[in-house]
Amino acid sequence: MSPSTTSPTASSTLSPTASSTASKDPIGAVLVVGGGIGGIQTSLDLAESGFKVYLLEKNISIGGTMAQLDKTFPTNDCSMCIMSPKLVDAGRHRNIKILTHAKVERVEGEPGHFKVLVHKKARSVSIEDCKACGDCAKVCPVKIPNDYEQGLVTRAAVYQLFAQAMPSAYGIEKRGIPPCRAACPLHVNAQGYVALISAGKFREALELVREKLPFPGILAYACSHPCERECKRIEEDRPIPICRLKRFLVDQVEEPEFESKGPEENGKKVAIIGSGPAGLMAAHDLRRMGYSVTLFEARDKIGGLLTDGFPSYRLPKKVVDKDLSIIEKLGIDVQLNTRVGKASAGALLQAFEAVFIATGIAGTGSITRAFNGLRGTRWGTILADPVTLETSL
């Protein structure tokens, strides 16, 4: 059997080679499921007998329960003294391939010719590059209960199961999406930047916010913070003031001049009609994806409700201007005082691969009249597919 990657999510298939499949002779490879002391010893015995062994373990390193024991019965010997040489032998043996952070999904075939589908989770740390020095764990701000120590102590999010672990490398275990992040419409990593703030890494925290949110200043003042309603801290006392922490970053952290001009253009052009929140966000995301973006705005300034929908004491103008300056720096072409009508709609469809309509409900009537074939609804909105949001045109 030989492993081969079957998907970007690190799933692997252990399957016989073509020449071996044609033969009736058994395949000279064995899959051992479970990396405890029994699985390790079995793998070593099979490997010494000449078999190719795939040792599969659900944790990020082999060792199993015995690695957690202090003494073994009945000799009262140190369990790690017995296991450590076997861990080293299994890791160095040329006939043993260790598959950690993995589980069996499906088994097909017959004895001697099995085909096994293995799902291997991302380790998030390269085994080849990791030196197991532990520097990453020292600076990691996230602390969670240590399962290896039965929850008696905490460990960092990046961790090694135990000191003598094999493979000798650290890893990060992903445990789903935090409820605060799931509740955010933009899925901003609130848990991540709150942890960075607690560690005093303010600039890194703001960079993490900007990965999903190009306008952190505006949202720091105007956000309705649904994340706080889902914060699990409310089960103890009160939710963490996530929005106020984001505002602290915006007000206190001095960012260097924004340098990015977006990636190289991929040759495809997209037109965006309207420069309100939806239009600006679409322009930002499309430009970061490599598209050439042209933004059409009927007024003499961009922003829509961001500039006219909030009083200055609620959303200061300097905050809006600072955030919206990113649009020009990304190389987005902004056409102000340009109203799209029947005369220009046809040319727009010819010049661009796609058109994104972000005029808001107030501009629906003029847009449906400008584009022949664009249908509206009885509620005054544009008819669109509920899943893809494609219009009838």
Image (spheres, rainbow, N blue to C red):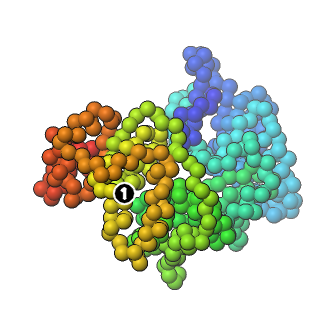
Would you say residue 387 is visible in this rendering?
no
User: As rendered, which of 327 and 74 lies closer to the eye?
Assistant: 327
Instruction: Specify the farthest residue to the bottom.
Output: 237
Q: Is residue 334 above or below residue 237?
A: above
Quadrant of residue 100 within the rendered picture? top right
Q: Is residue 379 above or below residue 370?
A: below
Q: Is residue 318 above or below residue 120?
A: below
Q: Locate residue 144, reporting x and y percent.
A: 64, 67
Q: Which residue is drawn at 48% across and 61% down?
A: 323
Residue 272 appears left or right of 30: left
Q: Residue at x 70, y 72 (%)?
A: 152
Residue 183 appears left or right of 175: left
Q: Where, quadrant-wise, is the N terminus in this rendering?
A: top right
* Residue at the spot of label 1: 302
Label 1: element kind: loop
Q: Locate residue 270, reporting x and y percent.
A: 36, 40
Q: Which residue is drawn at 25% across and 35% down?
A: 347
Q: Locate residue 179, reporting x and y percent.
A: 47, 65
Q: Where, quadrant-wise, is the C terminus in this rendering?
A: top left
Q: Residue at x 81, y 64 (%)?
A: 70
